[in-house]
Amino acid sequence: MRQFQTSYLSKETFREEAASWQAWRIEHAAGAALVHIFSDGANEADVANARAVVEEMLTDAVYVGASASGNLHNGNVTNEKLVVTCTFFEQPDSFARTHLFSVENRDAAAFRAELQAMRDQLADVRAIEVIMTIDTIPIREVCAVIEEEIPEDIQIWGGGAFGDNTFTAFVFEKGKAFNTHGIVMAMLGGKNFHIMNSYVIGWKKLGSPLIATRADGKVLYELDGAPAYQIYRHYLQIPNDEHIFYNALEFPFAVDCENRVLLRHALSCQEDESLVMSTDIPEGSVIHVTYGDPETILQSVRQCAEQIRAFSPEVISVFDCFGRKTFWGFKEASRETRPLHTLAPTYGFCTAGELIRRQGRMDHHNLSLVVAAMREGGPVERKMPELSLEIAQNESSMSMVNRLANFINMAMSELVEANETLSRMAVTDLMTKLYNRGEIQRRITERVQEKSAEPTGEDVTSVVMIDLDNFKRINDTCGHQEGDLVLTSVAALIREAAEKQSGGTAGGRWDGEEFMILLPGLDKAAAAAFAEGLRAEIEKLRFPKCDGETASFGVAQALPGESADHLTSRADAALYAAKNAGKNRVCTAEE
């Protein structure tokens, strides 16, 4: 693959550039050509002239284009209005095909039908570059359609065309006018075409997780039951003024989505202190506030660049969020793109959102850097350059903000751990490590109340009450240390037996040498069998001074409408029946 790139100045100078590209192509017998035309507020006539020159000088080339918020030129994020990049494929069977989908009226179903109708065009396709007018189409539905309809072995990456109050986001392809509700795809492939895609976040989580307790589309109303803006006002002292977008940009939200993290940032704050976000946040999502530290971000870029260097690319596509450019500031924004350009020629633009399919999932990212490295043929035996020193020099250092954030996170983690320990202690019997009476009683009550109407099938509930036989004799003759050993050994058997049952099974210390076990989903026959197995295990225990110990069991199954207190009273009565019948046995309560 060979790439040529220029900043459009005039139709005449660009025609000369394009003629030199075509001359190289003829001299080297190169094949297919793909052109990208990215406009950062360029005059519409200039875009039209650039398209006309491409069609005149590179007659069989296909091209795509989009509106941008900063173009990549020679690896730098620039303010040049119009940048044109031409990529030639040098392998005879490599190809590039384009297709523009119009998604009018946010009709994702029509997009699906059109995509299904062009399945034959996906033969030998290895990768698809996707550029969308993200704000004017149903982005979540569109990503789902792409994920479901395009074969999983085709790599997908891309970005969102940018628009603001000065121009509307648009995409286009050869032969088609600007489309402000569209998706343009460049399909690349061939038997010798190879690609690897990746993405960089770089923002780090800060503090404890939060829950999106109320959200609707892009509007995030509440976090942990409080107005969403409070997290910015209370903890970060970000005022709700005309600068909130730029201030909140340094502290976006990380949304946990299964085994991956997606960044979302606030665009504005409404009167009710809800936040209008860059993209939908599903209600119930787990969210972390994150912080942007330049050094951490550059380290993430370095890791991505090292992977790409091992791939030995010939061309690199870069879609960099305009929010990252805003975070860095224009003069510093190229710090994360230049290292990629040292590995291979790059093209791309600053986007209104980033797109990538990883591990079968098609995601829409914010504040990310999406990269696709491409080559024809196998890895080339050539020396790849070292990465830029502006990243390498930071490898052994840590910035002040990073240290402070680490300190806060560690302190928060230790506090959370301490609170969890206190919470466990509040419901745990210190000696046996089973639940204490208050907690096991609470769990039984909760279960019985929830399943009281029709306690049958999976909703059936049984309890088992246990009392150690002649335990006072052990304490009196062998000592309390031996008695404690008996209690902890029996408790270990109870815990082990409970862990083998279904979720919700719980054991607790009821009083002294008495224990209680909650058995959800087991009727009295199954609960009695459980109890008999545990009785036999207790009987096998041996101790240094008292030799062995036995226990008596009372089993009861909850009746329709029965209270928890009445249920445990019947289990207690069954236990005393076992005692009166000679101990070391299981008795079932009368109904």
Image: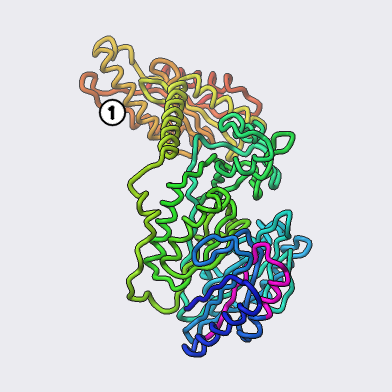
Front-most of residues 22 and 223: 22
> Circle 1 — which element?
loop
Query: Which residue is found at the position 35% from the left and 50% from the top?
Result: 395
Q: Residue 414, how many percent across, how many down? A: 41, 29
530 shown above or below 429: below
Give the residue at mark 1.
541
Q: Quadrant of the C terminus?
A: top right
Crowding at label 1, few (<14), some or many (≥20) Cα neighbours within 10 Å? some
Q: What residue occupies the far left of the structure in this picture?
A: 544
Q: Residue 130, how many percent across, how many down? A: 61, 67
Q: Residue 413, how many percent across, how many down? A: 43, 32
266 shown above or below 64: above
Amino acid carrying label 1: it is Leu
Q: What stretch is highlighted in magenta?
A: 31-52
Q: What residue occupies the far top of the structure in this picture?
A: 476
Query: Which residue is found at the position 64% from the left and 37% from the top?
Result: 213
Query: Which quadrant of the figure has residue 365?
Result: bottom right
